[in-house]
Amino acid sequence: TQLLEQSPQFLSIQEGENLTVYCNSSSVFSSLQWYRQEPGEGPVLLVTVVTGGEVKKLKRLTFQFGDARKDSSLHITAAQPGDTGLYLCAGGGHNQGGKLIFGQGTELSVKP
Amino acid sequence: EAGVAQSPRYKIIEKRQSVAFWCNPISGHATLYWYQQILGQGPKLLIQFQNNGVVDDSQLPKDRFSAERLKGVDSTLKIQPAKLEDSAVYLCASSPTTGGFETQYFGPGTRLLVL
């Protein structure tokens, strides 16, 4: 069974703090996606990374794909209460039969 | 552009009862997915359709779950009979062609509680 392990599972921080969420696997992925899910809603795609070592920035969010394409990280600078939600990483590719494998998620709470 | 629509949003049933969920994907999207998301876990793919054909149903518990996508548009997912462990959010997603690198657009989900 191919697994994506996210850490930490829960994170509660104050507004203005920085944080990093990790997504690790023993499997190689052709692509890795990060989603954000708010209560009562479905996940919404934030970014897709496809090249080992790739770094993408989305305003205060920085995403990195590991050189070996087995891991990824999401860094948020100066977190805001609006960043609160469940962050999911999902890996896909030929090794996964074309389907997405999701991590268990990181529940982030940013307090004002 | 309208998003993925799902109904009902919430459902409470007793074990051994039957339940059905409906999904209307984004217009023109060929691929439709049903996921099960248990509290505290990420979504797990149950079944993937491309148009009206099944691409992957390897994780669908076929003794109690069934799904169809008639005419390659709307889809229904049925559970019969339901068990306590089926309590979860059932997410429908669609993408323009076939999975992998593509963006999957998710609906709001149906929250099922089995008592």
Image: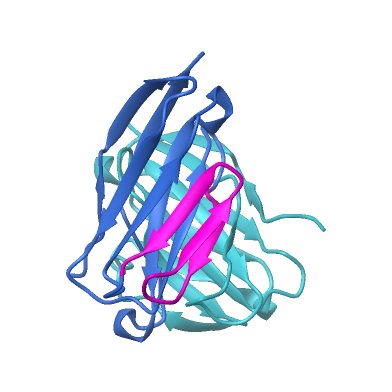
In the figure, A91 relative to A89: above or below? below
Residue at left offset 58%, top offset 39%:
B9
* Magenta run includes residue A64: yes
Which quadrant does the N terminus of chain B fall into? bottom right
Q: Nearer the viewer, residue B14 or A17?
A: A17
Task: Determine whether B88 is above or below A72 in the image.
Answer: above
Q: Quadrant of the C terminus of chain B?
A: top left
Residue at 48 percent across and 51 percent down: it is A62
Viewer-closest of A58 and B55: A58
Please tell me which residue is depicted at 57% across the width and 65% down the height of the picture. B104
Extent of the magenta region: A43-66
Q: Is residue B35 left or right of residue A72?
A: right
Q: Is residue B90 magenta?
A: no
Q: Position of residue B44 (x, y in %)?
A: 35, 59
Count of numbered marks = 0
**Can you say whether B5 is above or below A98 in the image?**
above
Q: Is residue A91 visible?
A: yes
Q: Is residue B79 visible?
A: no
The scheme the figure's colours follow is by chain
Magenta stretch: dominant SS? strand
Left or right, A95 with reference to B103: left
Q: Position of residue B13 (x, y in %)?
A: 41, 35
Give the blue chain's letter. A
Chain shown cyan: that is: B
Percent position of residue A47, x then y: 54, 59
Image coords of residue B107 (percent x, y): 61, 51
